[in-house]
Amino acid sequence: MAMIRRGLLIILSSPSGAGKSTLSRRLLDWDPTLSFSVSATTRAPRPGEVDGTHYHFLSTETFRREVSQSGMLEHAHVFGNFYGSPRAPVEAAISEGRDVLFDIDWQGAQQIVNSALGPHTLSIFILPPSIAELRRRLISRGQDAPEVIAKRMQKSWDEISHWGSYDYVLVNDDLDKTFAELQTIVSATRLRRLQQPGLVDHVRRLQTEFEELS
């Protein structure tokens, strides 16, 4: 008899360019039951971005209202814009036993870990193999001007300084190896006793069977 599992809030954080987005996509391909938490933001859509798929694009007024009404699990102000994770779809998913994947920074991670949903959170930080490689990856994207890359590098170091607050930390020097480690961590955490509320009833049934045989 399969037991109902409570969903996990899986948080992936890293400095920009460390491979977090690629690892997130691989996780979603690996397990189609995983839901991705689509963040809300007040920044303007970039070419090709679709509202509700890449982000929920909100006005500053609407975003602030959502925050005031506890509609965001976490939120932060980054590079002049607000970002946050809508609460309702996340709570619905985990109550149905589906895991939710978050691609957020350390500030958002700490807000979720310290919330009522904290016990059901798995936080993982991805480190680059070196600062030089991190900078090379940012430049190779060809998306940002030199001054923007300089700002991203400064923010990257700020992100790295918070590595110690995560459950697991992986050095992404080999993408396939890092992804295999990520799969192992997620699979093991799903089996935590806290994530299996049906265990109590199962043990009670075992007790009843044992007493009937006595």
Image (cartoon, helix red, strand yellow):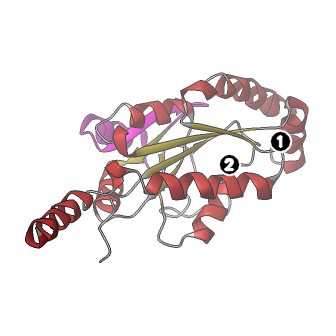
Asked if one can make out residue 69 in the rendered structure from this viewpoint, the answer is: yes
The residues colored magenta run 55-82
Q: Amino acid at mark 2?
A: Lys
- Badge 2 marks a residue whose secondary structure is helix
Nearest to the observer: residue 96 or residue 60: 96
User: What residue lies at 54% left-to-right and 36% top-to-bottom?
Assistant: 167
Q: What residue is pinned by disc 1?
A: 138
- In this rendering, the count of numbered labels is 2
Residue 7 vs 65, above or below: the answer is below
What residue is rendered at 50% in x and 29% in y? 107
Q: Which residue is mark 2?
A: 20
* Left or right of 201 on screen, residue 194: right
Q: Amino acid at mark 1?
A: Leu
**Foreground label between 2 and 1:** 2
Q: Is residue 91 left or right of residue 35?
A: left
Figure quadrant of the C terminus: bottom left
User: Which picture quadrant has residue 64?
Assistant: top left
Where in the figure is residue 160, as x and y percent of width and height?
68, 27
Q: Is residue 52 above or below residue 213?
A: above
Residue 195 vs residue 71, the one in the foreground: 195
Q: Position of residue 163 (x, y in %)?
A: 63, 28
